[in-house]
Amino acid sequence: MHKNRTVALLSMRLILGLIFFFQGYGKVFTWGVENLYQMDFFYGTYKDLLPEFLIYGTAYYTSFVELIGGFLLLIGFKRDYALYALASVLVIVSFGHGLAEPIWDLSHVLYRTILLVGLLLLPKAWDTWSLDHFFKR
């Protein structure tokens, strides 16, 4: 049973880390954050709803938090802080999608939220395959 808990938590952390890391990687290195900001689905959607500095800041904040937070989850370093930062991204994304379109496809956040909340609720002591656990010893 102990091994199952460890593997389950590791799987959740790695899956969530991969999702966020590659989301951020695509925004930062594939598209470029500046290009992302200029895209119709981003700036075009919110330009009449929010101040430009907020849209611009959100593009950079969410992109880099996804990239860095996802990486931290993958290696298991500062896990809780990474989860807090990534939770803020999910709140921002939920607000943004809801603002743009009141009835929207929840698949953008639902699975990530379930994994994130699960990781926050499960005991950190079960996360033995992580740098946090290694440095704690």
Image (cartoon, rainbow, N blue to C red):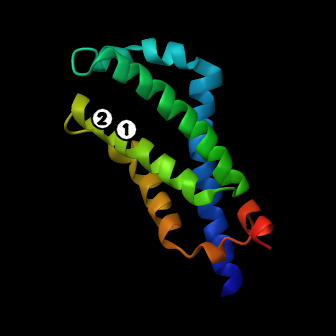
- Residue 93, quarter of the rendered image: top left
Whether pointer 2 and pointer 1 mark residues with C-beta atoms closer than 8 Å, the reply is yes
Residue in the foreground of this view, choosing between 115 and 87: 87
29 and 11: which one is in front? 29
* Quadrant including the C terminus: bottom right
Residue 113 left/right relative to 7: left
Using the numbered discs, state the Cα–Cα distance from disc 2 to disc 1 in whole angstroms. 6 Å
Residue 41: x, y in percent? 37, 20
Residue 7 location (% of width, % of height): 68, 72
- Residue pictured at 30% horizontal, 19% vertical: 45
- Provide the secondary structure element on which disc 1 rests: helix
- Residue at which label 1 appears: 93
Locate residue 12: give its quadrant. Answer: bottom right
Is residue 41 visible to the viewer in this orientation of the structure?
no
Q: Where residue 107 is drawn, which disc sits there?
A: none
Disc on res. 97? 2
Amino acid on which disc 2 is placed: His
Which residue of the protein is positioned furthest toward the bottom in this rendering?
1
Going by the numbered disc 1, the residue's amino acid type is Val
Tell me: residue 33, above or below residue 109.
above
* Residue at image coords 56%, 54%: 81
